[in-house]
Image (spheres, rainbow, N blue to C red):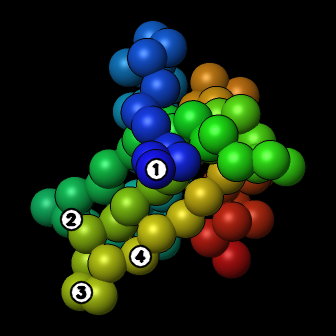
Amino acid sequence: MNLFTKSHSQVDLAKLKQIKDWVYHNLDLHREISISISQLQCHEPDCPPLETVIAVMTNPPQQYKIHKPASQITEVEIKKLLD
């Protein structure tokens, strides 16, 4: 049983770029390091309906989750998440 599926909702590409810029800045990353942002729907009880997963392709890779859609993420939340 697959409890997570990719969201079919449209994500503003400018917002995704902004989130990536915040991650690069707050982690002081070189722009050659890839960052992937995905929105996932969860179908488990007590799970948020949509979460955003940020994967930073360092060695080892780092993964961060925010329990809301990417469109609602703020720079303050990114700073708290990465501290």
* Quadrant of the image occupied by residue 28: bottom left
Q: Position of residue 68 (x, y in %)?
A: 71, 38
Q: Does residue 74 lie above or below 22 as drawn?
A: above
Q: Which mark is residue 35?
A: none
Q: Say which of 22 and 61 sits in front.
A: 61
Left or right: residue 71 compared with residue 8: right
Q: Does residue 49 lie above or below 2 as drawn?
A: above
Query: What's the residue at 62%, 42% (across, down)?
Result: 42
Distance from disc 4 to disc 1, alpha carbons, whole Å, reads: 26 Å
Instruction: Mark yes or no: residue 21 visible.
Output: no
* Quadrant of the image occupied by residue 58: bottom left
Q: Name the residue under label 1.
A: 1
Q: Which of marks 4 and 2 is nearer the N terminus?
A: 2
Q: Which of marks 2 and 1 is nearer the N terminus?
A: 1
Q: Position of residue 33 (x, y in %)?
A: 21, 65
Mark 2 or mark 3: which is in front?
3
Identified by mark 4, the residue type is Gln
Identified by mark 2, the residue type is Ile
Q: Say which of 77 and 7 sits in front.
A: 7
Distance from disc 2 to disc 3, alpha carbons, whole Å, reads: 10 Å
Identified by mark 1, the residue type is Met
